[in-house]
Image: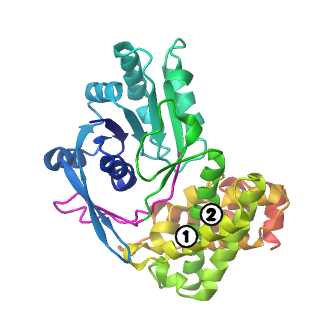
Amino acid sequence: MKKLVLFGAGKIGRSFIGQLFSRAGYEIVFVDKDSRLIDALNRQRSYRVLICDTCPETIVVENVRGINADDTVAVIDEVASADILAVSIGKNGLPHIVPVLSEGLLKREHDCPGRALDIILAENMRNADAFLHDELAKMLPQSYPIDELVGLIETSIGKMVPLIIDQDGEDVLSVSAEAYNTLIVSKDAFKNPIPLVDGLDAKENMKAWVDRKLFIHNFGHAATAYLGFQYYPEKNYLWEALEDDKIKNMVKAAMTQSADVLQYIHPNVFTREELQEHIDDLLSRFANISLGDTIFRVGCDLYRKLSPDDRIVIPLKSAFYNKLPYDRMAQVLFAALRFKATGADGKMFPNDVIFHKELENNGIESVLKNICGFADEMITNLLEI
């Protein structure tokens, strides 16, 4: 049995990456700091993925076990002997695995010289491949041929996984997810043959596909939350907001404008018809009642989602500097600045409280400049819309 070593036993790791490779016959070895998850994996050796759709389904993911991330000797051994590796820990977590990953690569080269390792970067992060390459290069000796032995595989993660079932009870492993099950990966980055895994979709021009996720999916998801809250602050779910055709049409118009920018900066990759079909499909998925996705979850964490390298600002900047229309996207930005949704506990996301204090104390121009990273000229244009 081939082995996938997966850093991160979180929602995407369990419901998507682990599930796909397990169904293809791989043993899945999760590496995580959460001892409760690791203990449960080693005790049960399986877990459930609950598909929330018009035709609900339960997928039992088998042949799994766990390694605590603090057990560095065991982690190094698993990396050295893996058939393929994946990472799903968030961009802030990537630097923390570099030391043990480097040691694993060196042991792998010692035990089996010349055996390449592909690493699937299941992160919502632009240029994740370049980032991890540079971090590994700092730790590995100059004599280690990283460009020949390590395939850094960028992905586009389109699966929505909003809920964890019974996380406080005995069943800590089950996770809910939508039915969508396609993992887009960079075709040209593999050093070994591309794994024969149903749902793995290898693409050329991967940067364009990563941007498609950011410009359309991430942007549209957030736009639904921000515009939904602006017009219906009493509603809790995305599907409730999208029941109003006014909100749905506003979100669609903003997504279409962002798609036009995407097509401009990545010509000859997508047709307008393909992108419009993608938008319509996403709006249908956002409105999935069974998924129970909340306005709060999708919109919160404003410092991150309004940062210079994230879903709202990048499409807006790209439109501005390429002299393309962005008035509908700007409506989403200003709705985000008013976002004060609360969770099930009736409280705002803690950092969003701080965000709004900063907005109140320093004003909108300061936030647009210092948090979003807009230049003065663009701020002036935005405030005139």
* Residue named by callout 2: 216
In terms of depth relative to the viewer, which is nearer, 164 or 189? 189
Q: Amino acid at mark 1?
A: Leu
In the rendered structure, does residue 288 fall within the stretch colored magenta? no
Residue 327 image point, x, y percent: 77, 72
Q: Amino acid at mark 2?
A: Ile
Horizontal side of residue 74 vs 86, given as left or right: left
Q: Is residue 315 above or below residue 282?
A: above
Residue reaching furthest left?
A: 43
Residue 117 image point, x, y percent: 44, 28
Residue 74 visible? The answer is yes
- Check residue 282 in the rendering and tell me which mark sits there, or answer none: 1
Residue 3 sits in which quadrant?
top left
Q: Is residue 155 above or below residue 350?
A: above
Q: Secondary structure at mark 1?
A: helix
Residue bounds of the magenta highlight: 155-179
Q: Residues within 10 Å of mark 2 (few under 14, many from 20)?
A: many
- Residue at the spot x=81%, y=59% of the render? 320
Q: Secondary structure at mark 2?
A: helix
- Check residue 357 in the rendering and tell me which mark sits there, or answer none: none
Give the distance between the C-alpha atoms of the residues marked 1 and 2, in whole angstroms. Answer: 9 Å
